[in-house]
Amino acid sequence: MTRNPPSLFNPPPKHIVWDWNGTLLNDVETALFAVNRLLAEHRLPVLARDAYLECFGFPMRDFYERVGFPSDIPPAQWESMVRAYHDSLNLLPAAIFTDARDTLERLRDAGFQQSVLSALHQPLLDKELAENGLARFFTLVCGAPDLNGSSKLETGRGLLRGLALPPNEILLVGDTLHDAEVGRGLGVQCALVSRGHQNAARLAAANVPVFANLEHVATEILRKNP
């Protein structure tokens, strides 16, 4: 289902900024596996997929608290948990969504520049984009300075400085309410895709366009830029 508020892409965007995990990369099952492995190691109840989609969010510390971890995890234990989570991700590799490459090519061929803004640690982000053959599509690739899964807002400010475009000519496409929060904080337009780490019912609260897939996002962008 696609929900389109009246302010859909106004003015028409000139530069598309993509989130990575859950937007271009189909990694919900991989993340759920990693979270449940960590929960089981700490003798906490594991999550069903629907429950994961209902509670996942940023910052990751808040998400971990929601699924049963204490709020006062010591720094050394937190670092160990984060590394264990990322180690588990390597056990169940994820692939990009089937329409991701075609969408990037379609928009590139139509003359759009594109970038990536992710909460994933920069070296991992660079590695995954290269492994999937997607790095060539992007003007800028902006990942996180660490593995902690914190807010993307400050990284986004750096991206805007690098693009040097009016914020309202930039469209951020993501899959979580945090992407909408970042979009508002940066003053850019935002659209969300409802097949990632949060479900459509949660995303509706952001009051931004919500699309079923990337193909629908590209079609609307191109419709607004004839």
Image (cartoon, rainbow, N blue to C red):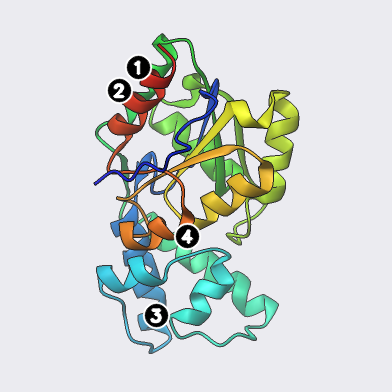
Mark sitting on residue 39: 3
Q: Earlier in the sequence, mark 4 or mark 3?
A: 3
Residue under the point 61% across and 49% down: 182
User: Is residue 194 shown left or right of residue 13?
Assistant: left
Q: Are marks 3 and 1 in contact (CB under 8 Å)?
A: no
Circle 1: residue type: Arg
The residue under label 2 is which amino acid type?
Answer: Asp
Residue 14 location in percent, x, y? 55, 20
Place of residue 186 in the rendered image (x, y in percent of width and height, measured from the top left)? 67, 43
Q: What amino acid is found at the position of numbered circle 3 in the picture?
A: Leu
Q: Is residue 109 above or below residue 121?
A: above
Q: Which residue is mark 2?
A: 102
Identify which residue, 12 or 56, lies in the foreground: 12
Measure the alpha-carbon separation of dots 3 and 1: 41 Å
Question: Which mark is drawn over residue 174?
Answer: none
Q: Earlier in the sequence, mark 4 or mark 1?
A: 4
Where disc 1 sits, the SS reads helix
Identify which residue, 131 or 64, lies in the foreground.
64
Left/right placement of residue 100 relative to residue 42 reads: left
Q: Which residue is mark 4?
A: 86
Q: Secondary structure at mark 2?
A: helix
* Tag 1 residue: 106
C-alpha separation, residue under disc 2 versus residue under disc 4: 28 Å
Q: Position of residue 101 (x, y in %)?
A: 33, 26
What distance separates the C-alpha of mark 1 from that of mark 2?
6 Å
